[in-house]
Amino acid sequence: MSFLGDLFFRPYRAEHRYEVEQLLTELLQIGGGDDFLSERPGAGFDLQCRHIRTRVIGVRLNEIGGLALLEYAFRRVSRRLGKPLGEHLRYAWDEIGDWIP
């Protein structure tokens, strides 16, 4: 979906707006700070070197809006933090819902 499409189409219900925006803000903070991936597990990263909180956020977004919301969040994060960090998020969300890296 395009940038303009994302402005007008929200893949979640109005009652989830605040929570989704909070989760997206947190994802941006994680990506801009710790990154979504690490070279080693531990200190907030699982055995596959994926940021644990990032995965928890992905699971919650999937519960709220499924694949459409995960894709929306991915596009928002990729636009804001750049394609390389977007690709890290893509891998970090592997095996969440119908997400395919």
Image (spheres, rainbow, N blue to C red):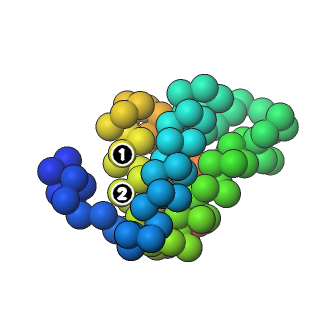
Q: Is residue 7 left or right of residue 41?
A: left
| Position of residue 12 measured from the top left corner of the image (x, y, whole percent) | 39, 70
- Disc 1: which residue: 76
Are the residues at dot 1 and dot 2 in contact (C-beta closer than 8 Å)?
yes
The residue positioned farthest toward the right in the image shown: 42
- Disc 2: which residue: 72
Above or below, 88 relative to 39? below
Q: Nearer the viewer, residue 94 or 51?
A: 51
Above or below, 37 relative to 19? above
Above or below, 91 relative to 38? below
Q: Nearer the viewer, residue 31 or 37?
A: 31
Residue at coordinates 24% horizontally, 55% vertically from top-left? Answer: 6
Could you classify mark 1 by the number of other residues whose Cα lies within 10 Å: few (under 14), some (14-19), or many (20 or more)?
some
Instruction: For mark 2, give the secondary structure.
Output: helix
Q: Is residue 21 left or right of residue 79?
A: right
Above or below, 47 relative to 16? above
Indicate the quadrant containing the N terminus: top left, top right, bottom left or bottom right: bottom left
Residue at coordinates 52% horizontally, 64% vertically from top-left? Answer: 61
The residue positioned farthest toward the top in the image shown: 33
Residue at coordinates 52% horizontally, 58% vertically from top-left? Answer: 19
Image quadrant in which you'd find residue 80 = top left
Give the alpha-carbon distance from disc 1 to disc 2, as whole Å: 6 Å
Q: Nearer the viewer, residue 58 or 12?
A: 12
Q: Is residue 40 left or right of residue 51?
A: right
Instruction: For mark 1, give the secondary structure.
Output: helix
Going by the numbered disc 1, the residue's amino acid type is Arg
Going by the numbered disc 2, the residue's amino acid type is Tyr
| Position of residue 32 measured from the top left corner of the image (x, y, whole percent) | 53, 27
Q: Is residue 67 visible?
A: no
Q: Is residue 56 visible?
A: yes
| Position of residue 59 measured from the top left corner of the image (x, y, whole percent) | 61, 65
